[in-house]
Amino acid sequence: MTDIIIVGHGTSLRGAGLGSAIDSYDCPIVRFNGFIHCCGVEDMGSRMEYLCTTTKQFRFFLKDKVIPTRELWIYEPEGKFTYDQYKGPFYVADLDEWLDIYKGIRAGLTSRKFCKGLAAIIIAAKRLDISSILLFGFDNLWRGDRRKYATMGRYRNKGVYTSRHDYAAERKIVDIVSKRYGVNISHAEY
């Protein structure tokens, strides 16, 4: 049984036709930054009970009227942000401890912050009373490899560029999160 699904932006979803299968799961679905500009509903689905985003990125979701049905998860508060723009339930996550762990194991010259997908995994495991998380489209993080990094989205170079994320370190953190919160984290096979 799957307690929650988190859908990423990995190119493995493009053309996979998994949208209706993802939406048909009898559990909540978490999405995070960038999903509205990725491949279509036929590949990613459209349900979204939770949205994980930063204060900086949330304004774009508001503009596009993309609102979760259960709760908004905010992390990385940057500057002034007024929650009166959003009338639904929200949770402000403190991920400083996890950023410190990441900084302690990341390779030099890589990003000082982990990816938004990892933030969604940490918040789900920490916030919800769950025993399992199923990931879709977490290609780079799940492999722990950025050499052939690609993502979907509306970027000037069509989602293919060099990432500064240290996915090997991030993959180690997934295992630490799993052990600490007693949550089985797996990636869907398709």
Image: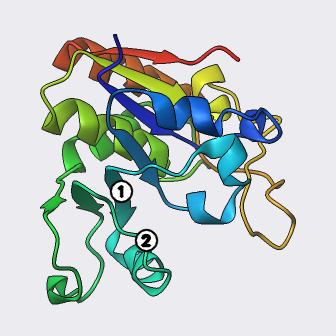
Residue denoted by label 1: 51
27 with respect to 14 (left or right): left
Would you say 146 lies left or right of 167 here?
Answer: right
Within 10 angstroms of label 2, few (less than 14), some, or many (20 or more) residues?
few
The x, y position of residue 59, in whole percent, is 40, 83
Q: Relative to 17, is 60 on the left or the right?
A: left
Mark 2–mark 1 CB contact (< 8 Å): yes
Residue 134: quarter of image: top left
Task: Identify the secondary structure beneath mark 2.
Answer: loop
Q: Secondary structure at mark 1?
A: strand
- With respect to residue 85, does 189 lie above or below? above
Dividing the image into 4 quarters, which one contains the N terminus? top left
> What residue is at 59 percent from the left and 45 percent from the top?
165
Q: Nearer the viewer, mark 2 or mark 1?
A: 2
- The amino acid marked with disc number 1 is Leu
- In primary-sequence order, the first of circles 2 and 1 is 1
Q: Is residue 53 above or below residue 145?
A: below
Measured Cα–Cα span from mark 2 to mark 1: 9 Å
* Amino acid tagged 2: Val
Position in image of residue 41 (x %, y %)? 65, 51
Q: Quadrant of residue 145?
A: top right
Residue 99 is marked as none
Residue 66 disc label: 2
Q: Which residue shows up at 78% across the image and 45% down it?
A: 150
- Locate residue 155, reporting x and y percent: 76, 69
